[in-house]
Image (cartoon, coloured by chain):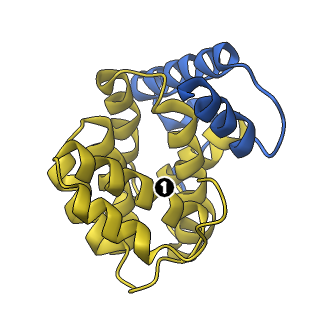
Amino acid sequence: MEIEVFNYGVLNYKNGISYKPSYMAEEAAYIFKVFRDTNIEGAQSLGGTTAR
Amino acid sequence: MDNIRSVNSIHYQCSRDELEIVWLPSFHFLMERTIAFLSPEEMNIIFDNVKNSQCYSDLSIDSLNMIELFYAVINQQHESVVHLSNEILIEDKIEQSIKNDYVLKAAMLSNIALNDKNSARKLWARYSDKNIKI
């Protein structure tokens, strides 16, 4: 039952596109690494600008 | 990557409208993609990035409450989740939206974690669209 609920959430929030949880875990790890590296290197590493 | 860039825009895009209409939904989406898979310590790296940004102080009270709610969820601070959800869900009737659905789920689960099932039921009774799965 819990797996069904989890899978529903996975399917639903991706607008019907089926992603496996393992893919999502990899994606989350990638996002973490980007922000970790950005904290070290500064916001411009993502193409930002300090202009307000 | 577009979603990451959009969240990162808080370092240079301080327009209140942009923050409300573009940044906050992007941040919400990023949270939903990461909370279930990263540790609180890893999530706090993302929060540090946002909180140290140039435009963080330009966010509205509502947006700050949402950010604090995500922070409380990540760190399992159930009393804070309940308190913040009360600040966000101020209308008697909780209308269906991505934001409201998340706050409702978080508040109900935190109430249950605090062994207050009655408050969780009362929240659910206020939800407008009980026919959909959230």
Quarter of image, res B93: bottom left
Q: Residue at x 60, y 52 (%)?
A: B26
Disc 1, SS: helix
Rendered location of residue B25, percent (x, y)? 59, 58
Residue under numbered circle 1: B102
Position of residue B102 in the picture relative to residue B45 (left or right)? right
- The answer to whether residue A40 is visible is yes
Q: Amino acid at mark 1?
A: Tyr
Q: Chain of mark 1?
A: B
Q: Residue furthest bottom?
A: B92
B28 shown above or below B86: above
Rendered location of residue B8, percent (x, y)? 55, 44
Quarter of image, res B20: bottom right
Viewer-nearest residue: B54 or B105: B105
Rendered location of residue B63, percent (x, y)? 41, 66
Chain displayed in blue: A
Quarter of image, res B103: bottom left
Q: Colour of chain B?
A: yellow
- The answer to whether residue B13 is visible is no
